[in-house]
Amino acid sequence: MTMSRKSISRVTLLLGLAASTAWAAGPAQASDEPVGAHLAAAAVQAAPVLAGAQEPPIPAGAQEVPDPAARQAVQVSVKRTRGKFNQSIFQVSGGTRHAGEVLRLASSPAFRGLDPHYLPADKSGRYRYEVTVHYRNGKFKKVVTYSNTPGTPRVLVEVIRKVETMPAPSFPPGFPFN
């Protein structure tokens, strides 16, 4: 069976999301409950929010404490284009050591503080990179740059390089049909 790179990326995305969800739960959540019990409990807790119920107002003197896990990147995608018909999409969402490095870079304060564009004076003959990072709190960050643009921050260049050189996943024979 032959899988296209896009199909492999989707499978990697799904596996990574499953792994990142399991990682977030951690050993503190371990119990004898069925596997879906945590998901069902989360759905029940989220039901009032989904139904349109409003949260109680925050008191005037209280400050909202930011959750560091909310700023954690869960998916990074890089869309590389050159011309009208030359387009490649690379996605990373966890599961491997290499993917963890990319997600840590995208979660760093240096990356989160990037401007939305790093554009050269002349765009002709260069690759255009559109980097989109989705975070655990549901927010996302999009940064656009071109290859060999002077002044592009090192963290952006590293994220692009690591996502582009991500090794393709290897699956056991017969996957996903055993």
Image: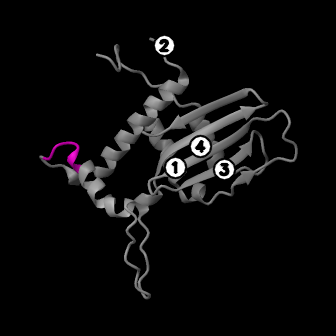
Residue density around tag 4, few if under 14, some if 14–19, many if 20 or more, within 10 Å: many
State how far apart marks 2 and 1 are (Cα): 29 Å
Q: Which residue is mark 2?
A: 2
Return the mark for residue 143. 3
Lower position in the chain sequence, tag 3 or tag 1: 1
Q: Amino acid at mark 4?
A: Val
Q: Quadrant of residue 51?
A: bottom left
Say if the magenta span includes residue 74.
Answer: no
Q: Is residue 79 above or below residue 156?
A: above
* Cβ–Cβ under 8 Å for marks 2 and 1: no
User: What segment is highlighted magenta in the picture?
Assistant: 33-38
Q: Disc 1 designates what residue?
A: 134
**Front position in the image: 87 or 54:** 54
Amino acid bearing label 1? His
Image location (x, y in percent) of residue 80: 68, 35
State which tag comes first along the sequence, 2 or 1: 2
Inter-mark Cα distance, 4 to 3: 11 Å
Looking at this view, name the residue that lies furthest to the bottom: 61
Distance from Cα at disc 4 to Cα at disc 1: 14 Å
Category of crowding for the residue at label 1, using alpha-carbon neighbours closer than 10 angstroms: few (below 14), some (14–19), many (at least 20): many
Query: SS class of the residue under badge 3?
Result: strand
In the picture as drawn, the residue positioned furthest to the top comes out as 1
Residue 104, placed above or below residue 50: above
- Marks 4 and 3, the one that precedes in the sequence: 3
| Nearer to us: label 4 or label 2 | 2
Give the numbered dot on residue 12: none
Mark 4 / mark 1, whichever is N-terminal: 1
Q: Check disc 3 and give the amino acid type.
A: Val
Q: Which mark is residue 159?
A: 4
Q: Is residue 95 visible?
A: no
